[in-house]
Image (cartoon, grey):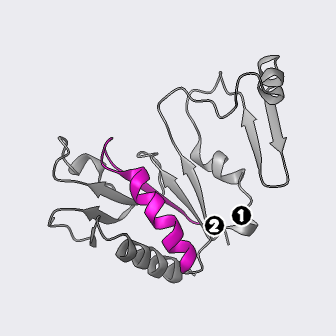
Amino acid sequence: MTVPLLAFIAWSGTGKTTLLKQLIPLLKARGIRPGLIKHTHHQMDVDTPGKDSYELRKAGADQVLVASQQRWALMSETPDCEAVDLFFLASRMDTRTLDIVLVEGFKGEQVAKIVLWREGVKRDVAPLMDDNVIAIASDSALSFSLPVLDINQPAAIADFIHSWLRELR
C-alpha cells in the first residue's frame, strides 16, 4: 500500500504552518508517523553559503546529498522545471518509515485535502473547494456537506486524520 498524501490548503496567512506544527506531535502521540512536503512560492535555499556542500553545488553539481549521523538532505537543482511535481517529490521519501505524508500547499493537486479557512481572511473559501476535499477546518460555522472541524482544536483535527487513515486501510 502506498502512503497516503493529505494536503492542507488555504489562502496565505490562514495558519497552515502553525496548525501543522501543532498536528505533527499530536499525530505522533497517536502512533502515526508523518512526513511533510511544503510548497513555497519564495526563492529558498536550505544550504549555507561558505559550507562545502553549498560551494560544491554552486560549482555545478546538479544534486548534492549531505549526510550526518543525525539526518541527511538531498538538494536538487531544478532550473528547467516548469512546475514542482508533488507525486515525484513524494516518491523521493522513504515511505517505509511513514504512515502519511502531510502536504502544505499544492492546492491544484488531485490528493485528499483539508481546507483551512478563517473569518478574517479576505478571500472566499469556495475557490479552494474541489472533489478531493475531505474536511474543512475553520473558526466559523460553515454549511458544507463535508465535516467542518474547529481550526483552533488541533487535537480534534488529529482525531479526524486518525479515523480517516483507519478507513483507508
Callout 1 amino acid: Thr
User: Is 34 in the magenta?
Assistant: no
Q: Is residue 88 above or below residue 5?
A: above
The front one of 142 and 48 is 48
Residue 38, percent from left and from top: 53, 46
Q: Does dot 1 land on a helix, a strand or a loop?
A: helix
Q: Residue at x 74, y 59 (%)?
A: 94
Q: Circle 1 is placed at which residue position?
A: 95
The mark found on residue 3 in the picture is 2
The front one of 86 and 120 is 120
Residue range highlighted in magenta? 3-29
Quadrant of the frame with the C terminus: bottom right
Q: Is residue 44 left or right of residue 75?
A: left
Q: Residue at x 57, y 50 (%)?
A: 37
Question: Mark 2 or mark 1, which has the lower sequence index?
Answer: 2
Say if mark 2 contacts mark 1, CB within 8 Å: yes
